[in-house]
Image (cartoon, rainbow, N blue to C red):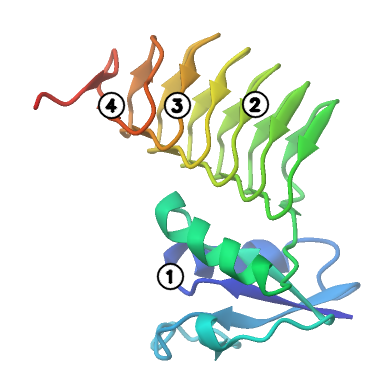
């Protein structure tokens, strides 16, 4: 029986705790053992039956553990996951049982697909991509490592999303449009033209904020 530890005891990490309990492998091949977080009292007042078992910086990976990333923002999760993996930690690729997966879908290490997600066909999701509740990824899409789609996002066919991209809740990318590495798409935005690396866009149609 493996022990699953959730990286991050913030809001998304606490959600992950309950998504993990709903997976058929929970209690069969692994069990949720607690959280990794540098804030010792991060879970105070929430009444969870498991707690923070170690600070991230003090955690020593072992063969009996699997980690799952409970951090949404790419700028926070990327350095932590890279550090832990460099120390030998192994990450669970988590697919909630309510997820709809089509064919020819490639999922990297540490990917998290939350309840109600639809991932169709001929898709590649890089390491540590997170797709939150009720979002959809259309055919022939690639999403780079460490990117995050918040709830109710829609990435349509033939799109290319770079690494460490953050899409706010309800954001959409129309077919064939590319989003560069490190870009931020504001909540509710509709992307109809390519987004350059490292910039923030918002609105319908999505555009960069004026300087």
- Considering every residue shown, the one lying at the far left of the view is 211
Residue at mark 4: 201
Callout 1 crowding tier (Cα within 10 Å): few <14, some 14–19, many ≥20: some
Alpha carbons under labels 1 and 3: distance apart: 28 Å
Callout 2 crowding tier (Cα within 10 Å): few <14, some 14–19, many ≥20: many
- Considering every residue shown, the one lying at the far front of the view is 86
Q: Which mark is residue 142?
A: 2
Q: Are marks 1 and 3 in contact (CB under 8 Å)?
A: no
Alpha carbons under labels 1 and 2: distance apart: 28 Å
As helix, strand or loop, the secondary structure at mark 4 comes to strand
Residue at mark 3: 180
Alpha carbons under labels 3 and 4: distance apart: 12 Å
Residue at mark 1: 10
Instruction: Compare marks 2 and 3 and give the one earlier in the sequence.
Output: 2
As helix, strand or loop, the secondary structure at mark 3 comes to loop
Disc nearest the viewer among 2 and 3: 3
Alpha carbons under labels 2 and 3: distance apart: 12 Å
Residue 61 vs residue 49, the one in the foreground: 61
Instruction: Compare marks 1 and 4 and give the one earlier in the sequence.
Output: 1
Residue 51 seen: no
* Residue 40, x across and y down, in percent: 43, 90
Q: Which mark is residue 189?
A: none
């Amino acid at each position: 029986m493996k022990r699953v530890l959730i990286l991050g005891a913030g809001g998304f990490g606490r959600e992950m705790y309950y998504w993990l309990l709903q997976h058929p492998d929970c209690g069969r091949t692994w069990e949720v053992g607690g959280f990794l977080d540098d804030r010792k009292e991060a879970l105070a007042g929430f009444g969870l039956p498991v707690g923070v078992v170690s600070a991230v910086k003090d955690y020593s990976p072992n063969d009996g553990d699997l980690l799952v990333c409970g951090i949404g923002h790419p700028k926070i999760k990327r350095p932590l996951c890279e550090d832990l993996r460099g120390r030998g930690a192994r990450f669970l690729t988590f697919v909630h049982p309510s997820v709809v997966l089509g064919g020819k879908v490639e999922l990297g290490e540490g990917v998290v697909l939350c309840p109600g997600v639809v991932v169709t066909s001929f898709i590649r999701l890089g390491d540590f991509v997170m797709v939150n509740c009720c979002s959809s990824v259309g055919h022939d899409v690639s999403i780079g490592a460490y990117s995050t789609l918040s709830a109710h996002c829609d990435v349509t066919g033939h799109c290319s999303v770079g690494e460490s991209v953050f899409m706010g809740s309800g954001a959409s990318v129309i077919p064939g449009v590319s989003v560069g590495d490190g870009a931020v798409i504001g909540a509710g935005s509709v992307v109809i033209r390519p987004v350059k690396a490292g910039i923030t866009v918002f609105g319908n149609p999505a555009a960069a904020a004026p300087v």
